[in-house]
Image (cartoon, rainbow, N blue to C red):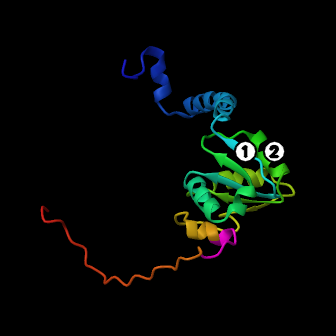
Amino acid sequence: SVGLPQGDDSRGWVLLPQTARRQYQKLRDKIPEMRHQMEAYNRLVPGRTRMGVVVAGLGRALCEELGREAPHLLDAVRLEISGYPISQNLFDICLSHCDHVFVFEESYPYIEDQLRNHAVHTRIRGRRDGTISLTGELSAREMRSALGLGQQVGKTPVALRAPPRPPRFCDGC
């Protein structure tokens, strides 16, 4: 009773092509219910402009931070993603209200790829078109640049010239 298979259930633990096909089909059968349950965690915030912003993870936190600095950003349609799989209906509604959409997500452009599959007349901007670097961490500076906000007022970039240090083990090692 620690989750180990009992009796006929043990066949599902051996990865053979026939087992993989069966398990994949079980997963596919669960997706509509999973999408329905995730609707409570994903939110579409209406806006007053034809610009859209899709945010997930760190992108969501950075968008809120940039919204305090540039309030007009909060006038954009925002699709806030907190859970997967994402309802295709949310994508369609978001795209119908926007002429162009910025996608800010961490790592691989998973949401951006799904949006591109749905977009007909809406321009999608993100990692795939080079608006944001395809590799590397998402940062406020990168989002600010993508949105055309420029450098934050009253702050200058810090140029540290720290001398390089050789690697070293701690005293205990």
Q: On residue 109, which mark appears?
A: none
Q: Earlier in the sequence, mark 2 or mark 1?
A: 1
The N terminus - image quarter: top left
Judge left or right: residue 85 versus residue 46: left
Residue 146, position as x, y percentages in the image: 67, 69
Residue 40, position as x, y percentages in the image: 65, 34
Q: Are marks 2 and 1 in contact (CB under 8 Å)?
A: yes
Estimate the spatial distance between the alpha carbons at disc 2 and disc 1, rounded to whole Å: 9 Å
Kind of residue indicated by mark 2: Ile
Residue at 67% x, 72% y is 149
Q: Secondary structure at mark 1?
A: strand
Disc 1 target residue: 44
Kind of residue indicated by mark 1: Leu
Dividing the picture into quarters, in which one does residue 28 lie? top right
For the residue carrying disc 1, how many other residues have a C-alpha within 10 Å: few (<14), some (14-19), or many (20+)? Answer: some
Using the rendered image of the protein, determine whether residue 133 is visible from the camera's viewpoint: no
The C terminus - image quarter: bottom left
Residue at 78% x, 48% y is 94
Dividing the picture into quarters, in which one does residue 106 lie? bottom right
Magenta stretch bounds:
145-151
Disc 2 target residue: 93
